[in-house]
Amino acid sequence: MKFQEQQHIRNILFILFALPGLSFSSWVARTPAIRDQLNLSTAEMGIIIFALATGSLVGLLSSGSIIARKGARLVIVVSSFLIVVGFLIIGLGTMTTTTSIVMIGLFIFGCGFGAAEVGLNMEGSAVEKTLDKILLPALHGFFSVGTLLGAIIGVSAEVLELPVIVHFSILAVLISVILLSCFRYLPKTTGMETNYVSTDNGVVGRKIKVWTEKELYLLGLWF
């Protein structure tokens, strides 16, 4: 792949890394409003948030094997879609004051969030190696940029008393538009595992098994 193409992928990744941060801080910012609308205690809200943690763990543990078979791009696309669906379901559950629907939405949202971090880190690591530059710290920095932006939007929504369903629906549309604009520029095969791969000079080597890389799972847990 050409150097210029890798630079373009790098720029796309800066945007995509911001999306999980944007989505997570948006949820956190509206937690008090959701708690009040569902009329839950702090302890009961903790039980609901457990669905988010469970979903994140499922997404984290399942994404490696999917990347090995289908590539990181598919995981990034599907995980972003899950975040969008999770947002909409959380908003619907809040509007109808149905705790179980909110929990389902949080579980789906968590699956998307956990898987997205693994897929994005895999794609970022591949670009980093190709460009021979340290990029992951900067990419993770854009996760923080997204977190800050989501917090600002969330606080503004609180001040304006914007319904959660409206707030999350706007974010779902925003994430969808960005994803549809960016995903086609990502390579399809990053992280895919095959028993053997031939290089341009005829050398045959064994590719690394993505799902056995412990460092990747630690990155997903951390972020």
Image (cartoon, rainbow, N blue to C red):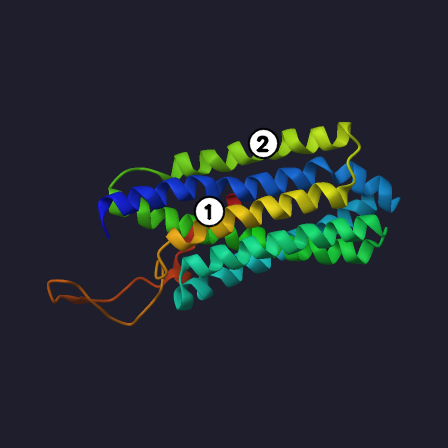
Q: Quadrant of residue 59?
A: bottom right
Kind of residue at badge 2 = Leu
* Number of numbered callouts drawn: 2
Is 153 displayed left or right of 208 in the figure?
right
Q: Earlier in the sequence, mark 1 or mark 2?
A: 2
In the image, farthest residue toward the right: 39
Of circles 1 and 2, which is in front? Answer: 2
Q: Residue at x 70, y 29 (%)?
A: 155
Residue 182 bears which disc, if any? none
Q: Residue at x 52, y 32 (%)?
A: 145
- For disc 1, the neighbor class at 10 Å (few under 14, some 14 to 19, many from 20) is some
Mark-to-mark CA distance, 1 and 2: 22 Å
Answer whether residue 51 is visible to the viewer in this image.
no
Residue 219 bears which disc, if any? 1
Horizontal and vertical percent position of residue 190:
35, 58
Instruction: Residue under label 2, please give it.
Output: 149
Kind of residue at badge 1 = Leu
Element carrying mark 2: helix
Q: Residue at x 66, y 38 (%)?
A: 26
Q: Nearer the viewer, residue 37 or 44?
A: 37
Q: Residue at x 68, y 41 (%)?
A: 27
Q: Nearer the viewer, residue 79 or 169?
A: 169
Horizontal and vertical percent position of residue 44:
82, 47
Answer whether residue 79 is visible to the viewer in this image.
yes
Q: Quadrant of residue 22?
A: top right
Horizontal and vertical percent position of residue 157:
73, 33
Element carrying mark 1: helix
Q: Quadrant of residue 101?
A: bottom right
